[in-house]
């Protein structure tokens, strides 16, 4: 029986892949399961830089811990688990940068968005009104604690967690920057 080069390659490719996988260090091997693959931990963040109206405000983890803390209980659809997170409201963090809720700021709040960026360059978008308790029943927090401990390395020390979304697609690990963009037309 004559084997072609293509047939030999096809027969040997699973063996080569298996040998390559076996040679990998255990920490680089993905778990073999039917669920969503595990994402690598993001680099930890140690501060949040807020850009608003041409001004920059930097808040460290210590600064954020000094702010009033809120605990939210959420269902993490990715893990199919109920979890608790604590930290200041995102609206309170934005107020530290000058976007405090007031009658005068109401048009600005209604016509602005905040782009949150993580250390892994993943970013999410929120309208400022949806993070402001005066306009929304949901809560968006800058999470510093998971359960009773600091977030695990997957959380990147500072996270964004919200109570309104069905899936945690707009949760953000390793929060490092908040950019407020206004659509206000004067």
Image (cartoon, helix red, strand yellow):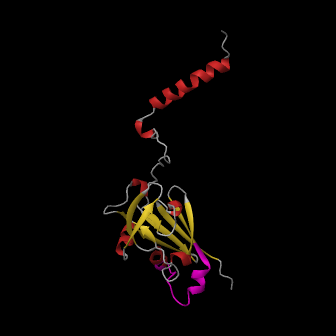
Q: At which x and y percent is residue 142?
A: 44, 69
Please state which of residues 120 and 5 is positioned toward the viewer in this rendering. 5
Q: Residue at x 39, y 71 (%)?
A: 64
Relative to 37, is 113 above or below? below
Q: At which x and y percent is residue 151?
A: 37, 59
Q: Is residue 33 left or right of residue 10?
A: left
Q: At which x and y percent is residue 169?
A: 53, 60
Relative to 35, is 147 above or below? below
Relative to 120, is 98 above or below? below
Please state which of residues 176 and 37 is positioned toward the viewer in this rendering. 37
User: Magenta region: which residues?
Assistant: 95-113
Q: Residue furthest top?
A: 1
Q: Residue furthest left?
A: 148
Residue 85 among magenta residues: no
Q: Quadrant of the C terminus?
A: bottom right
Quadrant housing residue 89: bottom left
Q: At which x and y percent is residue 78?
A: 47, 55
Q: Quadrant of the N terminus?
A: top right
Please state which of residues 89 and 50 is positioned toward the viewer in this rendering. 89
Q: Residue at x 45, y 29 (%)?
A: 22
Please state which of residues 58 and 15 is positioned toward the viewer in this rendering. 15
Q: Residue at x 47, y 48 (%)?
A: 40
Q: Is residue 133 left or right of residue 115?
A: left
Q: Residue at x 37, y 65 (%)?
A: 84
Relative to 58, is 105 above or below? below
Q: How many marks?
A: 0
Residue 105 among magenta residues: yes
């Amino acid at each position: 029986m004559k084997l072609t080069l293509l047939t030999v390659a096809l027969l040997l490719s699973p063996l080569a892949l298996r040998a390559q996988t076996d040679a990998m260090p255990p920490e680089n091997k993905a778990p073999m399961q039917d669920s969503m693959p595990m994402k690598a931990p993001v680099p930890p963040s140690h501060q949040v830089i807020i850009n608003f109206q041409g001004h920059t405000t930097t808040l460290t983890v210590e600064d954020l811990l000094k702010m009033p803390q809120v605990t939210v209980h959420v269902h993490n659809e990715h893990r199919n688990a109920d979890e608790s997170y604590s930290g200041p409201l995102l609206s309170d963090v934005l107020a530290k940068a000058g976007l405090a809720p007031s009658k005068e700021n109401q048009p600005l709040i209604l016509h602005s968005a905040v782009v949150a960026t993580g250390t892994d360059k993943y970013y999410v978008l929120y309208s400022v009104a949806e993070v402001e308790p005066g306009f929304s029943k949901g809560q968006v927090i800058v999470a510093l604690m998971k359960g009773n401990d600091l977030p695990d390395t997957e959380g990147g020390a500072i996270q964004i967690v919200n109570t309104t979304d069905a899936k945690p697609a707009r949760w953000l690990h390793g929060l490092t920057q908040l950019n407020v963009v206004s659509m206000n037309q004067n």
